[in-house]
Image (cartoon, coloured by chain):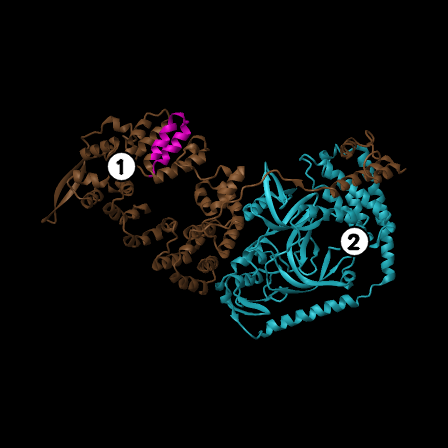
Chain colours: A cyan, B brown
Amino acid sequence: MQYNREQILQLAPDDASAKAGQQLAARSKWVALAENPKALWGDCQGSGKTPYRTIVDLANIAFKCTCPSRKFPCKHGLGLLLLHIQDRQAFEPKSELPPHVAEWLGKREVREVAKEQKAAEKQPDDFAKARRAEARERKVEGGIEELRAWLRDIVRTGLMHIPQQAYQFNTNITARMVDAQAGGLAAQLRQINQLNFFEDGWQKPLLKRLSGLYMLTEAYLRRETLPVELQQEIRTLVGWTTSREEVLQSTGVSDHWVVLSVTSSEDSNLTTERIWLYGRNSERFALLLNFYAGGQVSQHMLFPGMHLQAELAFYPGVSPVRALVRQQQALPPKAININTTSSLTNIYINITLALAVNAFTDQIPFVLNEARLVVRDDQWFLADAEGNAAPVSNEEDERWTVLAFSMGQPFSVFGVYENETFGLHYVWTRFKGLFVK
Amino acid sequence: MMEPGLMKAALLGTDQYVPDIGSVGPDIFRKIQALETGKEDRFLKAAYAALRYQEAGARPVALDFALPECPPEARPYAGDRLTALIHAALKDKGEVLFRYYLYRIAKSEKVLPSWLVPMVLNKALEAPKDRADLLEVCGEAGKWLCSLNPKWAAMALPDTEAGSTWETGTLEQRKVLLTHVRKTDPASAIALLETTLAEENAANRLIFVQLLAEGLSISDEPLLQKLTTDKSQKVKEAALDLLKQIPGSALNSAYLQALTNLLEVREERHLLVTKKKMLGIRADRPLDDALFKTGIDKVSKERGVDDHVYQAAQLLAFTDPAQLAPRLGMSDQELISALLHFKAAGVLVPFLVRSAVLYGNKAWSLALLHRDEATDIRLLDALEENERSAFYGKFLQNSLMTLLTYLFDDGYTPLPVKLAEQVIDYLARFPYNITQPVYQRLALHLPPGALTKLKAVINDGRQDYQARYFKTQASEMVRISELIQQID
């Protein structure tokens, strides 16, 4: 098994790079091509006299190119990797690395080690940090009081009029939360604008979000009474961040991880990227959450279906899911096969347990074996082997693609439960798999 | 539980309505009710608790129906590589390559992997003309999905035997059906059309009559004759136009007879020893007035051309040379030679071309192809494959696009190496004469032998803007050529 074209194209920073990369995946575009278990390298004839020198680190997917492009990876890197999967004979096997490739790989290794040392050595200025935190605390609490008053006013006058001003009614309070350095609350307020007020049934999700915000602020104000792990999660939901260094210093979980989905959503010029992983030995899920502002592009080199031996450090919490990658090493591709349950009831029980531990949990990953996707009168359900069913949240095109993939037969699925519906991210059978997201 | 009361309070506002929180449900609600904070505070806490309780206690619903499974696919699936290429072409809207990949799948009698079928079905919705080809590669999964999705259901292949599509289908479906039947069994198409002709509106009648142009034969005459009295002028004209073309139809025979009367053959001495047959058009034998009602213009539209010459020219366009020549005691070759030596031959040429194309006359086509005014590439149809290449140069210089359109067949036949090299040379000089999709299509017809030439052009030293543009296109053509070599 080998990584496929779709997976590699997921690394492209934009559609134009993906397209250009595909166009460069042809022997005729390269004046030299070679490979080694550690890397691929090639010289691509561009418009200038000197060909661009491109290298791909195979052990830990990374790219290097001498072209002037500011995109990363550039079209040459993508083209080289694509060409490798579609025409391996084009590459001359080399036992020795040429100097420029060896030098780059060496520098990468040194940089990784230095990064780890830096993380370990960084000594924060505790006094200054405490003063900053105290000042921010006052701001956040002030903001929270305003938010609570705003929420009470909203329910006093009723939600009936909100659809008429759906995109303005929370603008001021959202801005206020940003000023109060409660970014998490601001983000949750912004999410209210994503509700479809033109569709029947908007009332319940709106009430859930507003009352959820109120309860979150209540929990924050009374956090001293909560377990430490839950306090951490509440603080994170309000907008406090746990520093990367702090997380990276915690005990990690080493495992053979597989990337199950990479999704991104955009809101107010901020792209949120969610990468779901599953540890084959630890049998646990992990979520890598990345945020990119403005024109920033993805900084990681992970794509759906990628296998990696990695040590993940988890953010503190009641049931930690969010993690950071401490060390990683790409592994050869393999079939993804996760066996958990073929009963939707079991998944619902897991949801009950997750909500019982933390009532603010919004996303719960799941794997269901022997599932089927069924449709009647445009109502879509994920069905299990026991004849039970649950609603599906995927877009129409995705639903039809999954149904077509399954041909009405049982399949296994990885997905994420959110807003009382099930989103399907990756489906597979014994012989094939399909990344839906 | 208490959701209706909560929703009512949420919508109206707690100033208008305060729900009873503490009387039902778990103890937590009584505790909330007992809080001395304020009704909004109690309401918001109760609402979240109720909604989260409800969510945490949710269980799956029992399913009371099942979907039928897709029948097993008899044909093998396309390989991973081709599948990936089709997926990319669909996403990038690369129409030319998408068509080619479909052709490769159909040729190898394979089908698309089922997960790709919804995308292709959506494409088929947008392209009624290609629908049959697209549905073909979708295999059993395509039929199964069409039966489940009302949006696609109407696209299922027409049932030619039941005829239900003809009676109840949309106009697009009916056009597809009639075209399909006309191709496979022309007489059945006439029978099908006759079943509903009286109920069709004028626009539909016109569309359906025009579809009969394919597979035209004498057996179509009765229906077309009937349509010459149609209430719609456009339908009438369309029917007459078809009748004129059918050798042996009353109208075509009348044209032949009239033309025979108009033309006279004289033998003139040539170089003192040989005799040459010469044609004349008699001005003293006016056409029957009835013919002028069938679309023949009485008055010449060409300046300086006599009316009787112009009338004869129009008749020539609908006369089969193979029938006319014997009537004049001449061979096809002698006839075309005499017509082209006629003093107003320039006026006649477009009409002669139409006749040669319509009736596929080789002698006429060959003679006309040697004349500069004859630019209809369909004249090549009457020639053998090996005879055509001699004329490609003429079209290459006059209209490369016309030549390429003619050469680009559904089977993606490679161009002869010499011609391909000529085309490359021409394009290196005039790279903007064709568009990027045509470059892509050209790449699919390039023989491997022409790649050397293409690569040489890419590597030459020219750096002007035209050369740079062509080099980009040439690189893309090389890439496509390499790509299709690797398809499994």
Looking at the image, residue B359 sits to the left or right of residue A417; the answer is left
Looking at the image, residue B152 sits to the left or right of residue B433; the answer is right
Q: Is residue A169 visible?
A: no
Taking depth in this image into account, of B257 and B68 the one nearest to the observer is: B68
In the rendered image of this protein, does residue A251 appear above or below residue B103? below
Q: Is residue B199 magenta?
A: yes
Q: Quadrant of the N terminus of chain A?
A: bottom right
Answer few, some or many: residues within 10 Å of disc 1's Cα (few below 14, many 20 plus, some between 14 and 19). many
Q: Residue at x 67, y 57 (%)?
A: A278
The answer to whether dots 2 and 1 both sit on one chain is no
Residue A318 bears which disc, if any?
2
Looking at the image, residue B471 sits to the left or right of residue A323; the answer is left
Residue B164 bears which disc, if any?
none
Secondary structure found at label 1: loop
Please tell me whether the stretch drawn in magenta is mainly helix, strand or loop: helix
Taking depth in this image into account, of A49 and A74 the one nearest to the observer is: A74
Q: Quadrant of the rendered structure where residue B207 is?
A: top left
Q: Chain of mark 1?
A: B
Say which amino acid is labelled 1. Answer: Phe
Looking at the image, residue B203 sits to the left or right of residue A222; the answer is left
Residue A189, horizontal then vertical, whole percent: 75, 43
Q: Residue furthest front?
A: A386
- The span picked out in magenta is B188-214
Q: Of discs 2 and 1, which sits in the foreground?
A: 2
Residue A435, horizontal then vertical, whole percent: 60, 52
Q: Name the residue carrying label 1.
A: B318
In the rendered image of this protein, does residue A12 appear above or below residue A163? below
Answer few, some or many: residues within 10 Å of disc 2's Cα (few below 14, many 20 plus, some between 14 and 19). some
Q: Chain of mark 2?
A: A
